Image: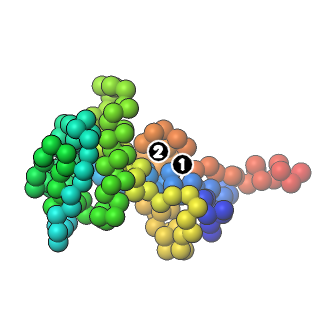
């Protein structure tokens, strides 16, 4: 069940598991996009009409700098000019209504990222897309959506923490619950 439109609560052999829905969905999306970015053949969905996005010169330079990773993620561009770019395709599963949010988040992340040799631009891109698209806290989820998040989370390589190393879930075992009732 869902608690406060923020947590998904489920049962496990030893007790209860409480999952932060936003953090869990972010982990799921991060692993999906990181895998997609590192594949040889990007998977895209073609747009019926090109989408024009306007940026400052500085922002456009950031986007041009990471264009290879964006293309590998499934974005396709038809043109860049001095103040805008045109998108002709998006990664599968990304709706065009989220594009401005994704690019704003991505530009902010790239501009604010402290250089760190442990993380590639592909990793940064996957983190940024996942953060932009993850189900936000406060959203009521259906039973099917809750089940999907639980199953997909525990199928992840690293289900315990977000890409930003924040805890995704806690477990409350029987002995902990017993201690609270004594």
Looking at the picture, how far across and down is residue 55, in whole percent? 26, 46
For residue 117, above or below residue 6: above
Look at mark 2 in the image and give the residue it sits on.
Answer: 162
Q: Which residue is drawn at 83% across and 50% down?
A: 180
Looking at the picture, how far across and down is residue 126, in whole percent? 32, 46
Looking at the picture, how far across and down is residue 115, in whole percent? 33, 25
Looking at the picture, how far across and down is residue 18, in whole percent? 62, 56
Closest to the observer: 124 or 162? Answer: 124
For residue 150, above or below residue 121: below
CA–CA distance between discs 1 and 2?
6 Å
Q: Which residue is drawn at 33% across and 33% down?
A: 111
Residue found at the far right of this picture: 182
Residue 2 relative to residue 128: left or right: right
Look at mark 1 in the image and give the residue it sits on.
Answer: 168
User: Quick one: SS at disc 2?
Assistant: loop
Tag 1 near tag 2, CB within 8 Å? yes
The quarter of the image holding the N terminus is: bottom right
Residue 124 relative to residue 78: left or right: right
């Amino acid at each position: 069940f869902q608690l406060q439109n923020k947590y998904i609560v489920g049962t496990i052999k030893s007790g209860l598991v409480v999952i932060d829905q936003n953090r869990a969905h972010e982990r799921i999306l991060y692993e999906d996009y990181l895998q997609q970015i590192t594949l040889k053949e990007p998977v895209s969905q073609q747009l019926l009409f090109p989408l024009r996005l306007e940026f400052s010169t500085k922002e456009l330079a950031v986007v041009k700098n990471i264009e290879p990773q964006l293309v590998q993620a499934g974005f396709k561009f038809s043109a860049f000019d001095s103040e805008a770019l045109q998108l002709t395709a998006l990664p599968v599963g990304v709706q065009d209504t989220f594009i401005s949010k994704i690019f704003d988040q991505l530009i902010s992340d790239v501009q604010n990222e402290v250089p760190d040799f442990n993380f590639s631009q592909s990793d940064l891109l996957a983190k940024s897309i996942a953060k932009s698209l993850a189900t936000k806290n406060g959203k009521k989820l259906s039973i099917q959506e809750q089940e999907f998040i639980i199953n997909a989370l525990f199928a992840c390589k690293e289900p315990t923490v977000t890409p930003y190393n924040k805890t995704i879930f806690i477990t409350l075992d029987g002995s902990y619950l017993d201690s609270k009732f004594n």
